[in-house]
Image: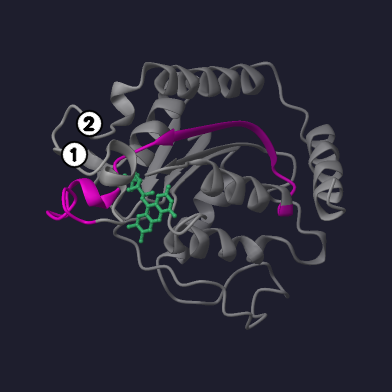
Amino acid sequence: MRILGISGSPRRDEVSGTRTLVETVLQSTGLDYDLVSLRDKNISGCTACLGCTGDNVCKLEDDMASLRESVARAEAYVVGAPNHFSGCNALTRAFLERWFQFRHREGDLLWGKPGVAVGVGGMDGGPPAGDIEGFFLFNLIEPVASVTATGAAPCYSCGFGETCGIGVPRMRHGENVEIGPEITPRVEDQPETMRAAARAGEHLGRILRDGWDRRQSALRAQERLMDWMAGK
Ligand SMILES: Cc1cc2nc3c(=O)[nH]c(=O)nc-3n(C[C@H](O)[C@H](O)[C@H](O)COP(=O)(O)O)c2cc1C
């Protein structure tokens, strides 16, 4: 495995736009990858116990323990999350918070690796993709591409979407909306989105094949992190 792909959606793989886009990016790299879905994983957020500061190994006993080695070994990351309340969902955030374990005393296991962020929202995929890029930068992983898309908000399948005044279907299509497959957003039906995912994967594959300079990449990531912290 050269690339680790993570789909942080809690929805079933068959209906998750996040999972579809992460997989499309990975396939388009032409390189060996693993795709892990967090939906069946039990992963808590960082508890700030500081148990990892001595050896850079988290001491919490949950499913993150078995993922640690994959995160450490991967040469690159493709991480995707759905938008939950204008940011990445809690499951993805918990997973990424636990990367705290890699960073102590200048632990450089993740430094200078390239990362692709994927975000899908019922209205806007930008916020989760932006959050993931922030986590990348905190770990000196360089964001090299970002893919955002519109997926189906739960209101398209909750059973009340045609009558609920604050649901996404009425917000997007008006109060006489009739919910059916033709108006239910699916990333697979959005050629530009699928092309963007393929382009991101091709780019990632190319830079890894060409020989990626992790030191230079870490320096670029550090500069972006500093600019971000300074509000630039
Ligand atoms: C609890 C919850 C909160 C959500 N909040 C937002 C939101 O703030 N903005 C948005 O664009 N979509 C929001 N959505 C819609 C999801 O982002 C949308 O269903 C997306 O397609 C999920 O991607 P997935 O199919 O990969 O899980 C929310 C969904 C849930 C379940």
Q: Residue at x 80, y 41 (%)?
A: 218
Residue of label 2? 183
Residue stretch rendered in magenta on the structure? 138-164
Q: Tell me, yes or no, whether the two marked residues, 2 and 1, touch with CB atoms within 8 Å.
A: yes
Asked if residue 147 lies in the magenta stretch, the reply is: yes
Q: State the residue at coordinates (67%, 67%).
A: 56
As displayed, is residue 95 above or below residue 60? above
**Secondary structure state at the residue bearing disc 2:** loop
Residue found at the far bottom of this picture: 49
Work out whether mark 2 precedes mark 1 in sequence or the reverse, and give the earlier one.
Answer: 1
Q: Which mark is residue 41?
A: none
Please give the residue where the numbered disc 1 appears in the rendered image.
Answer: 177
Q: Residue at x 39, y 36 (%)?
A: 150
Q: What residue sits 45% from the left and 33% below the top?
A: 33
Left or right of 197 on screen, residue 189? left
Q: Nearer the viewer, residue 80 or 191?
A: 191
**Residue 106 occupies quadrant:** bottom right
Q: Amino acid at mark 2?
A: Ile
Callout 1, which amino acid? Val
| Of the two numbered discs 2 and 1 in the rendering, the one whose residue sits closer to the viewer | 1
Secondary structure type for disc 1 = loop
> Looking at the image, what colour scheme do you see?
one colour
Q: Position of residue 220 (x, y in %)?
A: 83, 37
Measure the C-alpha gap from mark 2 to mark 1: 9 Å
Tell me the quarter of the image containing the C terminus: top right
